[in-house]
Image (cartoon, rainbow, N blue to C red):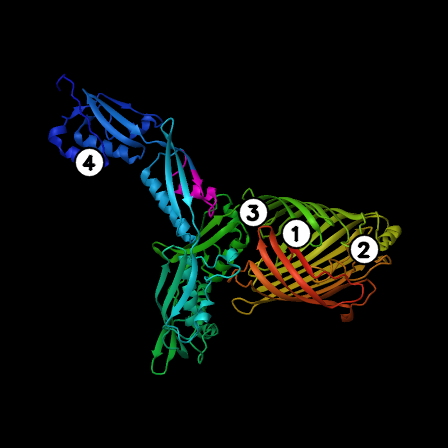
Amino acid sequence: MKQQLQRFRVRSVCAVVSMVFAAHAAWAVEPFTVRDIRVEGLQRVEPGTIFASLPFRVGETYSDDKGAAAIRALFALGLFKDVRLEVSGEVLVVIVEERPTVAAVEFVGNKEFDKDLLQKALRDIGLTEGRPYDKALTDRAEQELKRQYVNRSLYAAQVVTTVTPIERNRVNLTFTVSEGEPARIKEIRMVGNKAFSESTLRDLFDLDTGNWLSWYTKSDRYSRAKLNADLETLRSYYLARGYMEFRIDSTQVAISPDKQDISITVNLTEGERFVVSAVRLEGNYLGKDEEFKSLVKIRPGQPYNADEVSETTKAFTDYFGKFGFAFARVEARPEIDRGSNRVALVLQAEPSRRAYVRRLNISGNNRTRDEVVRREFRQMESSWYDGDKIRLSRDRVDRLGFFTEVNVETQEVPSAPDQVDLNVGVVEKPTGSVTLGAGFSSAEKVALSFGIKQENAFGSGNYLSAEVNTSKYNRTIALSTTDPYFTRDGISRTFDAYHRTSKPYEDQGGNYTLATSGLGLKFGVPFSETDTVYFGGSLERTQIKPGTNIPAAYLAYADEFGYSSTTVPLTIGWSRDDRDSALVPNSGRFQRLITEWGVGGDARYLRANYQFQQYIPLNKQFTLAFNTELGWGKGLGGRPFPIFKNFYSGGLGSVRGFEQSTLGPRDVTGSFIGGPKKITLNGEIITPFPGAGNDRTLRLFGFADVGSVFGEHETVSADALRASVGVGISWISPLGPLRFAYAQPVRKFAGDRIQKLQFQIGTSF
């Protein structure tokens, strides 16, 4: 190598790198051994990042090909705006110009989306504080933001990005949004329908042209996902009524030039209506043909119904799974007679092979321990595949309330045709909460609440809580902890410590209270998948604290048995719950029986409370609901039933239309003191609120209530029952279940306190 200095410089512009190195004759450098490598121009990037990307090291031979590869590798890092290589003797100099770093990302003019949500969306595509600025990434972010606004029917939304350079080679990014007005659906048309009117078909859609409640439901805002769901509803409607060749030919969505109005046109072909002539079973049914026939939902002589066909094939597949045939195939093959518009359905079954479950794999539980999920599974490893147990297991995991999604997938084991793995994927949700809030009801006025809850403490599945509630009539301080698997068999254990003060709602301004403090221990024993029996006991102390306007019945009880009472109540309870939802049930049944036996202390008594609820879906929109609650109490050991254990009735949760807790016995002062016997009967017809589509979180209901409370020496008589009818609204609000009810008493007596309009948070029935 000559001693004179050679200079080699390559201007690296990505589009011309290959051409620069192609001009080898003009820029070529004879290969040489690199004695040293220097890096110039670094500000924030570590030199090690450069050295790790170079395809050569000190002591190795440098060539033009390696130089081109070095430039490509450095540009691929995405950290540099310019890269140059210079050769000085046997020293290679790497000169870089770093991209500016994003110092801050701000949004101006956004109202539809929360700022934090937008920043998270940009963070997911790599545009966030501390990352190198990339113009292509910024353009992509603009398009993504526009797409998000289009999904909200804001077609006129504009996004402008401003890049502001600041000191130390940094930039501030500002996305200025002009949202405009949302585009609204002005017309939905059906073309090709003959059997059903256009209005009937439009009523199937969640999308509509708007009504007085659209500000809440946003049903007049176009969404491709919602339209696809509505089209599937339309298809199902026809297929369930015999039109087995129904098809949607096309869907046109047109937007006005000002991007404010949207028209939707659905072109469809109904086809002929077919009636089922016969149903036949073909294939291998494991010698259990009669059992499979009992699962057939398809009815010959009735119009073809795709829902019944789907239910039947699914029932067959599930039944095969019960015997371990995880890969069973069931096909409903139609044999169409177009001359008579009749169709015979052939149910072809092939059970394939029986399978064992080799392994249960759990994923997605970053915080929750595997044990918490595994102990809910009834399908065991190394056991026959059982579809019923797998579905039950999935439901049990879902009912834990720790996950937003629970999916179970069956995966074949390679080289083992008789084995499968079950892959359980979960998506965790936050299970801890700190709440501070205020509520208001027509009965209790202002109530403040504070609570700390952790439903999945430390990922163990245990429950911990501390609650404080204040209201005009009921105040509570309570601590509770539950171990749902105190034993391996699933017996739960609950510790409770509480202090409650209460008084009747109608105290006429009095300031007396009933104060109850206690410690309790309870065990829950599962006897089946839906039945649990509870055993427990506690130590309670109740004090009657006298004050102004204290009812005479309380004074009489206190004068005879004292103002304080200590008791040891034992609790035995049972519950069965197979409802499809605890908040907005549509089907299923709930039953609960709680008995309390005061076996020690100053108060001896028996107290029982039974509740029964039944939900019957009448169709897609209407649900019939019934509620029955019966209470009974009796004093033991020659003593009367403790007055502070009385039941109350009237108001929300019992007989609406009457003031809270004002039904039943009164003492000589006219105060309502409740009683040891209670009966409540409620019936409701529930439907989504008009204009809210099929949104079940906002519902309208009509109701009829019957009930009352009776004294210890009174006979329960239908003649003494009060009754009311009315309408109401229930809403699953951010504060909890909220119910408004307007009731008209249809059976009342002189002296009854009437309150036609009532509302409360957290009340059912």
On the image, the x and y values in percent for residue 344 come to 38, 78
Q: Which residues are magenta?
A: 106-129
First in sequence: mark 2 vs mark 3: 3
Front position in the image: 205 or 479: 205
| Tag 2: amino acid | Ile
Front position in the image: 238 or 460: 238
Residue under the image location 36 percent in, 64 percent down:
251
Residue 259 shows up from this direction? yes
- Secondary element at tag 4: helix
Residue 461, numbered label: 3
Q: Residue furthest front?
A: 258
> Which of the two marks, 2 or 3, is nearer to us in this view?
2
The crowd level at tag 1 (other Cα within 10 Å; few <14, some 14-19, many 20+) is many
How far separated are the C-alphas under marks 1 and 3? Answer: 16 Å
Which residue is under mark 2? 643
Proximity of marks 4 and 1: CB atoms separated by less than 8 Å: no
